[in-house]
């Protein structure tokens, strides 16, 4: 469902599937992840890219819950 906020559980699942140190989600893997999360492929790719940009210290539109999640778990290394 478009428009609903992402939860920490969804971020956990996203980054288990596509660690930030790895390749960005694409292709069939992106399609499967989007179906699993009940999100669009654009939404999944966008969240991963926002997290990656945040971890790289670049300008981002990352939601506070995403930034807090990444910081708390030390995923930006």
Image (cartoon, helix red, strand yellow):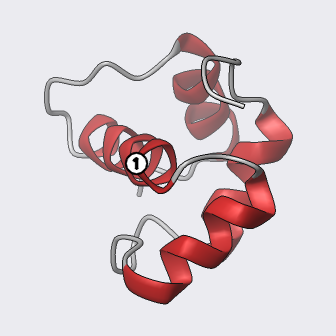
Q: Residue at x 37, y 76 (%)?
A: 26
38 relative to 49 in the view: left or right = right
Q: Quadrant of the N terminus?
A: top right
In the rendered view, tell whether residue 53 sits above or below residue 77. above
Q: What residue lies at 22% left-to-right and 45% top-to-bottom? A: 56
Density class for disc 1 (Cα within 10 Å; few <14, some 14-19, many ≥20) is: few
Q: Position of residue 37 (x, y in %)?
A: 76, 54
Seen at 50% across and 73% down, the residue is 30
Front residue of this view, candidates 25 and 62: 25
Q: Position of residue 5 (x, y in %)?
A: 69, 18
Q: The residue tagged with tag 1: helix, strand or loop?
A: helix
Residue reaching furthest to the left:
58
* Residue 38 against residue 27 in the figure, above or below: above
Say which quarter of the image contains residue 57.
top left
Where residue 55 appears, x then y in whole percent?
33, 43
Which residue does the numbered mark 1 point to in the structure image?
A: 42
Q: Is residue 32 visible?
A: yes
Q: Nearer the viewer, residue 26 or 13?
A: 26
């Amino acid at each position: 469902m478009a428009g609903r906020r992402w939860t920490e559980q969804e971020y956990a699942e996203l980054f288990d599937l596509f660690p930030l140190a790895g390749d960005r989600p694409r292709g069939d893997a992106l399609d499967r992840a989007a179906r699993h999360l009940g999100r669009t492929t654009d939404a999944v790719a966008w969240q991963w890219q926002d997290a990656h940009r945040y971890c790289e210290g670049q300008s981002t539109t990352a939601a506070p819950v995403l930034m807090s999640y990444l910081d708390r778990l030390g995923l930006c290394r």
